[in-house]
Image (cartoon, rainbow, N blue to C red):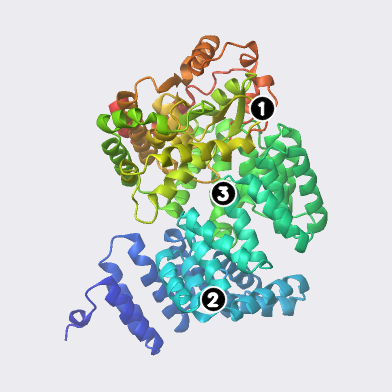
Amino acid sequence: MDTNNRQPSTPKDALQSAKQALSQGRFDQAVATVSHALSELEDAKDKVELLYVKAVAKRLSGDNQAAIDINRDLLKIAPNHARVYQELAYLNRNLNRTQQAAESFYKATQLNPALLASWNALLAHYKQSGNTEAEIIAQAQIDYLNALPKQILHARDLMYEGQLHQADQLCRRFLQTNKHQVDGMLLLAEIGIALKVYSDAEFLLESCLELYPDNTAAGIEYLKLLSKMGRFQAAKDIASQLLIKHDNHLGILSAKASAMVGLGEIDAAIDLYHHALSLSGESAGIYLLLGHAYKAAGKLAEAVKAYQQAYDKQSGFGDAFWSLANTKTYAFTDAEIAMMEGYCDAQTRLESVSKDDQIHLHFALGKAHEDRANFDSAFRHYDVGNRLKRHANGYNSEIVTAQVANQKRVFSKRFIDKIIKRSKEACHAPDPIFIVGLPRAGSTLLEQILASHSKIDGTMELHNIMALAARLRGQKNQYPEMLETLAPEYFSRFGQQYIDDTRIYRQNAPYFIDKMPNNFMHIGLIRLILPNAKIIDARREPMACCFSGFKQLFAEGQDFSYSLQDIGQYYLDYVDMMQHWDEVLPEFVLKVKHEDVLDNLEGEIKRMLDFVGLEFESSCLDFHKTKRVIKTPSSEQVRQPIFKSSVDQYRAFEAHLAPLKDTLSPLL
């Protein structure tokens, strides 16, 4: 009889059939079912769970080496799969590789802290090895997981495995019958943050703290969200309140210090980080944050030392190495390059270096090799880092293209004319100067130049306009359509709220800069609520701008930058959007080309100041002497006089840039 006729017809059916065979101890049948299904598949994502079941079946049948090989192949497709590391741990334990097993169990718990089996295995290992401190941590996590309602434990597991919508649905069903249960509220907020529904998450966490003021986990999650949203004053105030009850709590101390950096209170933040270090036994993570604070203050030597202390304290700490590279002026030693290359070695990577560390290390190695003119090696590392990052964020360029089309449709000439007629209902404050564009287009340089003027305050990349757009969008994705029917009084309210909420970032100057580059999508909204605002489009030559973005690992957002095709398409969409604004809002936006600034600094400064309505000041020419907090990757570059060395840097990589050039061809 032809057994293939009995094979399941779809990957989903094959997976269910293989799991059933596995649960019944029919391991060979499970392997056969999976193998047949895999032969029919081309998409790597569809293969992941099937391969995982096959690996489990091989382990349970006693074929340890085959299982190890399958798991390692799996990690090439799904490097963040926690249960694969758990499987490797079981296999290493079967082969009496105790230390390797412990490392893999630990890696599994870092990727998915809800894996009880791995925590229990680690606890046994720590007890046997006499590691009391680690034993206490493992036991605390086991106690926490065991205390969770089963539905919430399952939902947490789903969240950590990337199944956010399933986790959200399960959590909401639980809260329907267990209203205000703290674990459910906290988890739903965490899922909201992961889905970038920040307004919902903020409401949940604020409510959670009101109901359960002693819940430290909710407090720390709330502080993280506030900082992510750029609401540093609120984060500082709440951290101060929490520290009254939780004196010297490292997580809260660090969150308060980070908020203070955001507010420009650098010296006090540095003191607080040093206090945290005295309590933590010199934590690598706190050394990293201390380095960021020093860098923001322009104290580069101190920042470098802190970053080096961070990687000394934690083996393979990719963020510490990348932070050194991200100073843009640090030169790695031979020993540091060898160390990073060692962490990226295939075997080391699979067994002990996290995906996040791998990403940071590859970007750092790209910069290290570029500095030494090893351009092929540099591109190889940039490419690997970008591929890993893009795999993690799942960016879809079609969404941005659709958003641009939607903005163009809603903000038609007819609608704009109607807005202008109703301008009396908006907030007429002239204070904001928005600098928009793509990251790495020279916006930080423009900000530093303008902030050197006595009547302009520099701030940072403020999240307020994007937060307003997200709030208007809501869960039904109604922005920008809903602006056509919004009651006129809301225009003034939103504009005034923006002015009020951003006041904390200002000094005493009549004007201030908001340099969130992504605001180019929302120029229509800005015109609606702040008609007297000034907008500067920081424009840079397409190839140079896009490749500079491709080389940059951003702290968050900018998900379009991790593929040459994606960043090229984003640039096209950005140009399309800006052309539309120029057509429907003539003279509302001033385009400033980066190359023109480099060639004619004084002339471009006068042009920008004339656009804002201010007299020229020579301090703008000496912008590199201006002392202020700068948190973007270009912080050290804008503390130096104008230089042109970066204009054509991409040309050394042209042999690798065909996908970018092809995408940008309409502009080249």
Q: Residue at x 66, y 37 (%)?
A: 332
**Front residue (pair 96, 368):** 368
Task: Examine the rendered structure and indicate whether residue 230 appears above or below residue 46.
Answer: above
Tag 2–tag 1 contact (CB < 8 Å): no
Residue 65 vs 320, above or below: the answer is: below
Which residue is tagged 3?
228
Task: Tell me what residue is drawn at x 47 percent, y 40 percent.
Answer: 494
The secondary structure type at the circle numbered 1 is loop
Residue 199 vs residue 310: left or right? left
Q: Is mark 2 on a helix, strand or loop?
A: helix
Residue corresponding to mark 2: 91
Q: What residue type is labelled 3?
A: Lys
Front residue of 11/237: it is 237
Circle 2 Cα neighbour tier, 10 Å, few/some/many (<14 / 14–19 / ≥20) = many
Q: Residue placed farthest to the bottom in the image?
A: 24
The answer to whether residue 344 is visible is no
Q: Position of residue 242 (x, y in %)?
A: 72, 59
SS at circle 3:
helix
Image point (38%, 70%), residue name = 49
Q: Can residue 639 be seen in this view?
A: yes
**Above or below: residue 275 compared with residue 94:** above
Disc nearer the start of the sequence (2/1): 2
The image quadrant that residue 116 belongs to is bottom right
The amino acid marked with disc number 2 is: Leu
